[in-house]
Image (cartoon, helix red, strand yellow):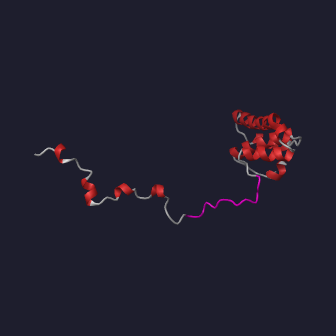
Amino acid sequence: MYERAFDLDWETISAEEALRRMYALGISAELGHEYDDERTRILRIADTAYQRSVLDLAYNEGRNALRDHREEYESDDAAWEHLVEAKGIDLDPSAEEIDTDETPSELPTAVERASMLELDVDDLERLKLPKFLRRDD
């Protein structure tokens, strides 16, 4: 199951991707599919003992998530899909990637000129102090 969701032939991965993979490896291990080489490779990319312990925690969290709720699922595939997708891991490799090179044709409304700056002369009069509060010099 793990090899269907993740590419086993990777050179480098981000820390976030490493956490996702370790969580999925934990679920996979609990289902009886061990990937010791993959787990070791992911642990080797961690620079510090703290990072390795966080990766181990993600692995154990995956194992515990399945162990605690295994009876809720009809099959191993259903458990895998539910638990991995619940953590936001995309299992569909054919899903379209977001193209970040496209420039929007118009500005978002949050960065447009504020409507309160578009005042008429009469509207500006409303912003001045009333006559009874002004000092007559």
Q: Position of residue 47 (x, y in %)?
A: 70, 38
Closer to the camera in the image, 9 or 103: 103
Q: Which residue does the image show at 27% across and 55% down from the upper left? A: 124
> Which residue lies most toward the bottom here?
105
28 on left or right of 107: right
Q: Position of residue 126 (x, y in %)?
A: 26, 52
Q: Is residue 95 magenta?
A: yes
Res 72 visible:
yes
60 on left or right of 16: right
106 on left or right of 66: left
- Total marks in image: 0
Q: Position of residue 2 (x, y in %)?
A: 83, 48
Stretch of the chain drawn in magenta: 91-103
Q: Is residue 38 magenta?
A: no
> In the image, is residue 56 above or below residue 3?
above
Q: Position of residue 106 (x, y in %)?
A: 50, 64
Q: Main secondary structure of the magenta part?
A: loop
> Which residue lies most toward the right here?
32
Closer to the camera in the image, 47 or 135: 135
Res 39 visible:
no
The image quadrant that residue 46 belongs to is top right
The image quadrant that residue 62 belongs to is top right
Closer to the camera in the image, 20 or 118: 118
Closer to the camera in the image, 100 or 70: 70
Q: Which residue does the image show at 76% across and 60% down from the upper left? A: 94
The image quadrant that residue 98 belongs to is bottom right
